[in-house]
Image (cartoon, helix red, strand yellow):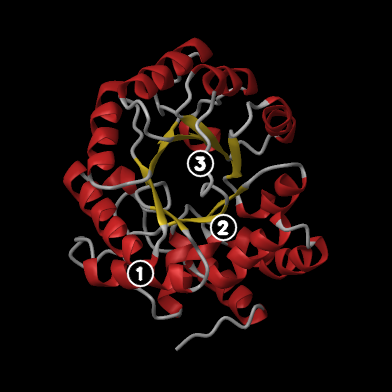
């Protein structure tokens, strides 16, 4: 039976990682950004995911970012779902254990990338991780556009039924039929999160439990309010917020994420616009598009 995680519901922010010009993690800026999230209604924090540029960080940096998130979260009673996945099963197990020791409340584990495992391989990969960190909640992360592998509804449901600590999935496949099958057939207490801002409202209407958001980095109050309104059944209010935010939700992916998001946050004077190669800052056309969206949404710049 799936472990019931009462707090795993609502808006979770896939945190950006601020870097200095020399490429190092900007600790002071990161702590301020985490505090800003919680002060604006976000109670679930996801460090070291795709948006956090974890693929460009070494293990010690990722662990440091997770520890900082945990330290700030404890002060304001938020929860931390740490990104711990890789395409190496043994390495994922090792790092997930370290994240648990660092105080994370759960792990977000992405589908193995590059290897292109079969569904049997995916089942074996996640099963081995679940058995190796018994009792520690795991959220699957299915994002085929980045990993070249899709966790089918059948595999997700088999994993949820087999392992009590596989408690949720972040679905960024864009396949509504697949996601609806998971929602319809999931075990009791298994949660489904949208992995795409623009899909959150319709997926919650279909029975999903929340959103892991990029947009909340920029506008945490509005994004978390949209999700909460929808979960509470206030669909008219939620829909109004959804359409207000939709231009930004879409513009955040005009180029490789998180470059657009970091540009907006730079314009808001929240961080320096530094990314790690192979990611580069937003192009001129991208900046023009984002500035137009910011003007439309009356996002303050300084």
Q: Position of residue 77 (x, y in %)?
A: 40, 62
Residue plotted at (42% across, 35% down) = 137
**Contact check, label 3 and label 2, Cβ < 8 Å:** no
Whether residue 214 is situated above or below residue 107 in the rendered picture: below
Characterize the local packing of mark 1: few (<14), some (14-19) or many (20 or more) Cα atoms within 10 angstroms.
many
Camera-nearest label, 3 or 2: 3
Mark sitting earlier along the chain (3/2): 3
Mark sitting earlier along the chain (2/1): 2
Camera-nearest label, 1 or 3: 3
Q: Position of residue 106 (x, y in %)?
A: 39, 41
Residue plotted at (28% across, 47% down) = 56
Which element type, helix, strand or loop, lies under badge 2? loop
User: Which disc, if any, is residue 273?
Assistant: 1
* Left or right for 289, reference 110: right
User: Which disc, if any, is residue 5?
Assistant: 3
Which element type, helix, strand or loop, lies under badge 3? loop
* Left or right for 63, reference 111: left
Q: Give the image quarter of residue 280.
A: bottom left
Residue plotted at (59% across, 43% down) = 193
Q: CA distance from mark 1 to mark 3?
A: 36 Å
In the rendered image, which quarter contains the C terminus?
Answer: bottom left
Q: Which residue in the protein does label 2 denote?
A: 254
**Contact check, label 2 and label 1, Cβ < 8 Å:** no
Q: CA distance from mark 3 to mark 2?
A: 35 Å
Total number of numbered labels? 3
């Amino acid at each position: 039976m799936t472990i019931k995680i009462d707090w795993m519901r609502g808006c979770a922010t896939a945190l950006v990682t601020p870097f200095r010009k020399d490429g190092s993690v900007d600790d002071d800026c990161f702590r301020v950004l985490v505090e800003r999230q919680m002060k604006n209604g976000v109670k679930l924090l996801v460090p070291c995911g795709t948006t956090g540029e974890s693929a460009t960080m070494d293990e010690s940096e990722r662990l440091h970012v997770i520890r900082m998130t945990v330290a700030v979260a404890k002060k304001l009673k938020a929860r931390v779902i740490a990104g711990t996945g890789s395409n190496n099963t043994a390495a994922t197990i090792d790092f997930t254990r370290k994240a648990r020791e660092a105080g994370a409340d759960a792990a977000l584990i992405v589908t193995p990338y590059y290897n292109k495992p079969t569904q049997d391989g995916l089942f074996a990969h996640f099963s081995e991780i679940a058995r190796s960190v018994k009792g520690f909640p795991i959220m699957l992360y299915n994002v085929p556009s980045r990993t070249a592998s899709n966790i089918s509804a059948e595999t997700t449901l088999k994993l949820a039924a087999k392992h009590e600590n596989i408690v949720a999935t972040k679905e960024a496949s864009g396949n509504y039929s697949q996601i609806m099958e998971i929602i319809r057939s999931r075990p009791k207490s298994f949660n489904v999160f949208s992995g795409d801002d623009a899909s959150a409202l319709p997926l919650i209407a279909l029975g999903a439990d929340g959103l892991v958001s990029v947009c909340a980095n920029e506008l945490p109050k509005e994004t978390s309010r949209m999700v909460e309104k929808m979960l509470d059944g206030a669909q008219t209010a939620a829909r109004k917020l959804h359409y207000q935010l939709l231009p930004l939700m879409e513009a955040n992916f005009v180029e490789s994420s998180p470059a657009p998001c970091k540009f907006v946050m730079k314009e808001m004077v929240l961080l320096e616009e530094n990314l790690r190669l192979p990611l580069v800052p937003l192009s001129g056309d991208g900046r023009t598009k984002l500035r137009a969206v910011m003007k439309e949404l009356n996002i303050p710049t300084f």
